[in-house]
Amino acid sequence: MIAPLPPSPDRLTVLLVDDSRPVRAVIRTLLNGLGFARVFEAADGDEALVLTHTCRPDFALIDYDLGLATGLDLARRLRAPGTGAAPDLPLFLLAADGFAHLARGAAAAGFAAVLPKPVNPQTLLAGLAGCLPAPTVLPAASLLGSAGASRS
């Protein structure tokens, strides 16, 4: 029997949660450029919960500031014992520079990593690489150089 191929970005489904449509567009473009073809967007926690049920993402990128709530609030809802939509979904918190103070709260809420905004291909891939189900084939961040860097 032939062993199944490890998942590559084009086979993974991403949930992107940010209350800013322009920021979502930039991050979606970056993800598409890295090979992630299936990116679903949510503007708030309620929409993210619905998409989690319907799209079955492989991981979620969640902004810290979601307007009336925070990404930490959403993570707690996703992880709620017995009622959480995605208790094992890898979550990545996106936060503006100077996010070090969020690390402890993010870990307690169930985030695998805190990634800095503005997002760029190198930091995104570095953050994802150690936390996605193995083996996942991601593009080598070292091959990206400065090409494709985005601001959000």
Image (tube, grey):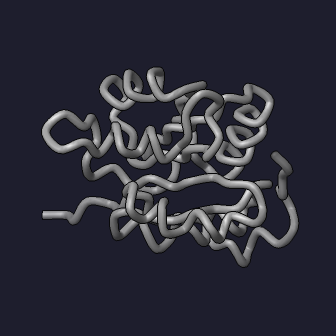
| Number of dots carrying numbers | 0
Quarter of the image for the C terminus: give it.
top right
- Direction from residue 97 to residue 93 in the image, left or right: left
Residue 62 is situated, as x and y percent measured from the top left of the image, at 55, 44
Residue 31 drawn above or below residue 1: above
Residue at 66%, 43% in the rendered image: 32
* Residue at (29, 45) in percent of width and height: 79
Which residue appears farthest toward the bottom when viewing the image?
142
Q: Nearer the viewer, residue 152 or 148?
A: 152
Q: Specify the quadrant of the image occupied by residue 6.
A: bottom left
Q: Is residue 95 left or right of residue 5?
A: right
Question: Which residue: 76% across, 36% down?
Answer: 23
- In the rendered view, tell whether residue 147 sits above or below residue 32: below
Residue 1 point in image, percent of width and height: 12, 63
Using residue 143 as the reference point, say whether residue 85 is left or right of it.
left
Residue at horizontal 44%, vertical 58%?
A: 111
Residue 65 position by quadrant: top right
Asked where in the image residue 140 lies, by quadrant, the reply is: bottom right
Task: Please state the horizontal and vertical placement of residue 26, each as a whole percent of the image.
Answer: 78, 39
